[in-house]
């Protein structure tokens, strides 16, 4: 009976050591999401927003697609790799106003392995978007982070 007890105790101690030892291992990646700045433009047509959204997403990522013809909802994914697939994505939505449009930015990244945070991706997108539409027409009207 004492051999059985010693064996059980040793097995339990080994399992406990393995469990506590695994706490020192690196944590898995986290999904980082951010809302970028919202842009209100009253001097350009909605088509300018769509053109700038497609161009900005293509500049930051390797391509962009509209989610249905004429929806004004543009998305792009970062290049994938064999181990993780795509680890970043972003969307720009263009909403019509009476005179102009509103553009919103949403970004996501799996950190690590993606090197940039979602907020950094949104900053790159909004900077590229502003350059394509003319920054003097851009009026930031809010930003946030999820």
Image (spheres, helix red, strand yellow):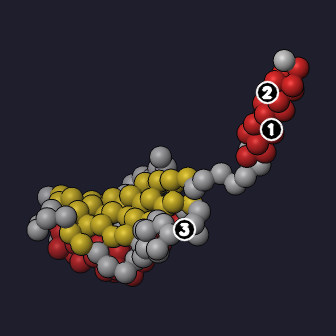
Residue 99 seen in render? no
The span from disc 3 to disc 1 (Cα, nearest Å) is: 36 Å
Closer to the camera in the image, 66 or 97: 66
* Relative to 65, residue 6 above or below: above
Q: For the residues carrying marks 3 and 1, which lies nearer the camera in this image? A: 1
Q: Residue at x 77, y 49 (%)?
A: 24
User: Is 85 rendered above or below residue 11?
Assistant: below
Residue 25 seen in the current view: yes
12 and 117: which one is in front?
A: 12
Residue depicted at x 39% and y 55%: 141
**What residue is pinned by disc 3?**
114
Tell me which corner region of the image, top left, top right, bottom left or bottom right, holds residue 41: bottom left
Q: Which residue is mark 2?
A: 8
**Residue 115, percent across and down?**
58, 69
From the viewer's perspective, tell me whether residue 113 is left or right of residue 62.
right
Residue nearer the viewer, 137 or 124: 124
Q: Bin the neighbour count of mark 1 within 10 Å (Cα to Cα): few under 14, some 14-19, many 20 and up.
A: few
Query: Toward the viewer: 60 or 43?
Result: 60
Mark 1 lies on residue: 14
Q: Quadrant of residue 5?
A: top right
- Residue 89 percent location from the top left of the image: 40, 65
CA gap between label 2 and label 1 equals: 10 Å
The image position of residue 14, as x and y in percent, is 80, 38
Q: Secondary structure at mark 2?
A: helix
């Amino acid at each position: 009976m004492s051999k059985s007890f010693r064996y059980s105790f040793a097995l339990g101690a080994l399992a406990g050591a393995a469990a506590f030892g695994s706490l020192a291992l690196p944590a898995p990646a986290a999904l980082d999401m951010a809302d970028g700045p919202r842009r209100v433009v009253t001097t350009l047509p909605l088509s300018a927003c769509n053109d700038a959204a497609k161009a900005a997403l293509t500049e930051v990522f390797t391509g962009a697609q509209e989610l249905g013809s004429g929806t004004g909802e543009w998305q792009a994914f970062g290049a994938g790799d064999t181990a993780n697939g795509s680890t970043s994505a972003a969307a720009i939505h263009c909403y019509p106003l009476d005179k102009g449009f509103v553009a919103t930015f949403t970004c996501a990244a799996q950190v690590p392995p993606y090197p940039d945070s979602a907020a950094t991706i949104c900053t790159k997108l909004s900077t590229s978007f502003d350059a394509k539409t003319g920054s003097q027409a851009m009026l930031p009207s809010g930003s946030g982070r999820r």
